[in-house]
Image (spheres, grey):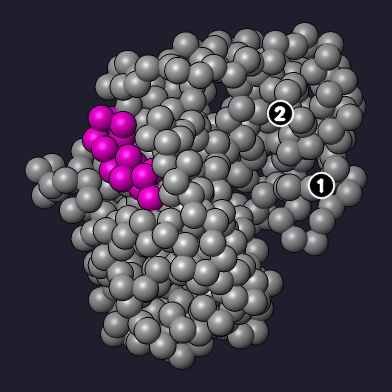
Amino acid sequence: MRFEPFKIKVIEPIAITTKEERLKYIENAYFNVFFLPSNVITIDLLTDSGTSALSKYQMSAMMLGDEAYAGSESYYKFEESAKKLTGKNFIIPVHQGRAGEKIITTSLINRGDIVISNTLFDTTRGNFEFGGAIIYDIPEEHSLESEYPFKGNIDLNKLEDLLKKFERKVKLVVLTITNNSGGGQAVSIENVKRTKELCEKYNVKLMIDACRICENSYLVKLRDENYKNKTILEIVNETLKYADIITFSAKKDGLNHIGGFIALDDEKLADEFKNYLVLFEGFPTYGGMAGRDLEIIAVGIMEALDENYLSHRISQVKFLNEKLYNLGIPVMRPFGGHAVYVEAKQFLEHIDENEFPGQSLVIALYIEGGIRAVEVGKFMFKDAKYNFVRLAIPRRVYTYSHLEYVAEVFENIKKKKDNIKGMRIVKESKFLRHFTSHLEAIDNWHLKV
């Protein structure tokens, strides 16, 4: 859908700054865009997590929030929507997805256990590694520009080899849907089904990180002839029925600014998770969220299943992907569900991988146009295959003209990309370094672009 399937009712001013101001701001932020205050950002593509615009129905539902500590009426609405989405019997609310990951890790993971995934994203990886797990990411191998429709899949041959090799040391197989670190790519239902068959064969639980399950299901509908006549909810349900454990960050396809849940059918395991829930998050009928957020998510889950909304959502990602591709910018193809991924090493081929070309491009985008993006490459993941810069598009926030502007900034950067050099870390955190590290621009290249 080429136009927005909504009317704008409330507006938020956008910061318009000069290049001289942005140079000062980025230096004060230690060349890490996570330290930039939002009021100096023109277009914020740092993340699609918790950045959605709320609908009038969600705003209305907020006023119905029951803030009771136990037995909140709002929880039961939230639970009903979550059960409809997942098809699971037990719904455990958490304040966001990583809180669910912590509960699962605390309950299931011991030091030396193995977790196998199509590719874990940052906090999921961080939680499992903090718990002592050894991680194997085994996505299918495809070239950057291949138009294969399901490049988010796990490699089933490698999966079975690892399950055979490590036998009972494998604690979980995890499918991230869509595959965020792998370029926001879709996962096919056939791949999920066959992954489940292997898990059953080797007596291993399958966990699905389903925070973008609605977007993945729309891509399945577009790209798999077997599902073109299915509703989005039918595709979601079929995908998730194969999971033993589901984590869901409602900051994505829940269309809220906070919240999430764990969903499963195993009552004994659910009770164990609830023990940690009370310790870490709160009582099982609020799980670290306010009643008003439970109400918003209950509505948001249903809105995320709407095909008109999803058509517009995915079309925006496609639009920016095609714009950059036509400019000769190396992007992951085909388009994914929530973001455009630029391969920074191919774009800035003169910069050594160890000098973080992705972070250099992130800095150049901010200096040139006030755009905030995020590096999803060697800076975020030391063993990353690609040096991605992710342009994550918030839901129902920006128009096509905003995305046109992003493409124009890339065009300007391309003209002077040879002036861009690498980055150097001067202060590094033990976990998830990309959030809090301090960097510097080698030879002060930022003053020359």
- In this rendering, the answer to whether 199 lies above or below 368 is below
Say which amino acid is labelled 2. Answer: Ser
Q: Secondary structure at mark 1?
A: loop
Provide the residue designation for mark 1: 437
Provide the residue designation for mark 2: 38
- In this rendering, the answer to whether 181 lies above or below 280 is above
Residue name at image x 21 percent, y 38 percent: 222
**Residue that lies at the very extreme toward the bottom in this rendered image:** 168
Q: Position of residue 287 (x, y in %)?
A: 55, 65
Q: Position of residue 111 (x, y in %)?
A: 65, 84
Stretch in magenta: 298-311
* Residue 447 sits inside the magenta stretch: no
Question: First in sequence: mark 2 or mark 1?
Answer: 2
- In this rendering, the answer to whether 217 lies above or below 277 is above
- Secondary structure mostly taken by the magenta-highlighted segment of the chain: helix
Q: Position of residue 384 (x, y in %)?
A: 60, 52
209 horizontally vs 49: left or right: left
Instruction: Decide which of 254, 34 is in the foreground and name it.
Output: 254
333 horizontally vs 384: left or right: left
Nearer the observer: mark 2 or 1; the answer is 2
- Say whether residue 287 is visible: no
Mark 2 and mark 1: span between their CA atoms? 18 Å
Say which amino acid is labelled 1. Answer: Ser
Residue name at image x 35 percent, y 21 percent: 6
- In this rendering, the answer to whether 401 lies above or below 142 is above
53 horizontally vs 204: left or right: right
